[in-house]
Image: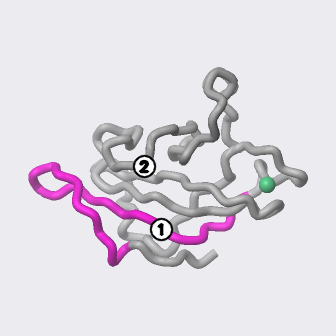
């Protein structure tokens, strides 16, 4: 289960546009530059759904030189529990349904972010 970050959510009344890999709410449109790991070299924006209430969320995932590349297991990407939300079920504690990779970005050799549309695929859940 992810943290609900009440220190952030109580101060910002608008709904987050997306959540990072640890469920931190983000309020600017997703860009790879907003990855939480400054050393990330692959980032993905996923659409997921709560198993219980089917509410959908946009969530970011990332990998770096020190972790397993996202692109090596692209169709098996799994976010885990959805961000905490007002759920009539126990959805915040249940694994999400991974729906689709909306955006996929990779750093090139110049450390510029390049979008990789061939990896923006539906996910098998
Ligand atoms: Zn739910």
> Does dot 1 land on a helix, a strand or a loop?
strand
Q: Is residue 37 left or right of residue 122?
A: left
Q: Quadrant of residue 5?
A: top right
On residue 50, the disc is: none
- Front position in the image: 82 or 67: 82
- Residue 99 is situated, as x and y percent measured from the top left of the image, at 60, 71
Task: Kindly tell me whether mark 1's CB lies below 8 Å from ligand 1.
Answer: no
- Front position in the image: 44 or 14: 14
Q: Quadrant of residue 69?
A: bottom left
Label count reads 2
Q: Is residue 98 above or below residue 11?
A: below
CA–CA distance between discs 1 and 2? 13 Å
- Residue 125 is situated, as x and y percent measured from the top left of the image, at 64, 75
Q: Residues within 10 Å of mark 2 (few under 14, many from 20)?
A: some
Q: Residue at x 72, y 43 (%)?
A: 84
Q: Residue at x 55, y 46 (%)?
A: 17
Q: Is residue 27 magenta?
A: no
- Between disc 1 and disc 2, the foreground one is 2
Q: Residues within 10 Å of mark 1 (few under 14, many from 20)?
A: many
Task: Kindly tell me whether mark 2's CB lies below 8 Å from ligand 1.
Answer: no
Q: Is residue 122 above or below residue 95?
A: below
On residue 101, the disc is: 1
- Residue 35 is situated, as x and y percent measured from the top left of the image, at 38, 43
Q: Residue at x 48, y 52 (%)?
A: 60
Q: Is residue 66 left or right of residue 109?
A: right
- Front position in the image: 1 or 50: 50
Q: Tell me the quadrant of ligand 1.
A: bottom right
Question: What residue is disc 2 on?
Answer: 30
Q: Which residues are magenta?
A: 95-119
Q: Looking at the figure, which quarter contains the N terminus?
A: top right
Q: Residue at x 51, y 61 (%)?
A: 46
């Amino acid at each position: 289960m992810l943290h609900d970050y009440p220190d952030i959510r109580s101060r910002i009344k608008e709904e987050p546009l997306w959540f990072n890999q640890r469920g931190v709410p983000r309020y600017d449109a997703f860009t790879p530059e907003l990855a939480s790991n400054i050393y990330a070299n692959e980032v993905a924006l996923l659409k997921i759904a709560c198993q219980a209430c089917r509410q959908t969320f946009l969530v970011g995932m990332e990998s770096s030189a020190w972790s397993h590349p996202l692109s090596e297991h692209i169709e098996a990407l799994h976010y885990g529990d959805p961000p905490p939300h007002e759920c009539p079920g126990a959805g915040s504690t249940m694994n999400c349904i991974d729906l689709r990779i909306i955006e996929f970005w990779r750093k090139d050799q110049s450390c510029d972010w390049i979008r990789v549309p061939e990896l923006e695929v539906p996910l098998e859940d």
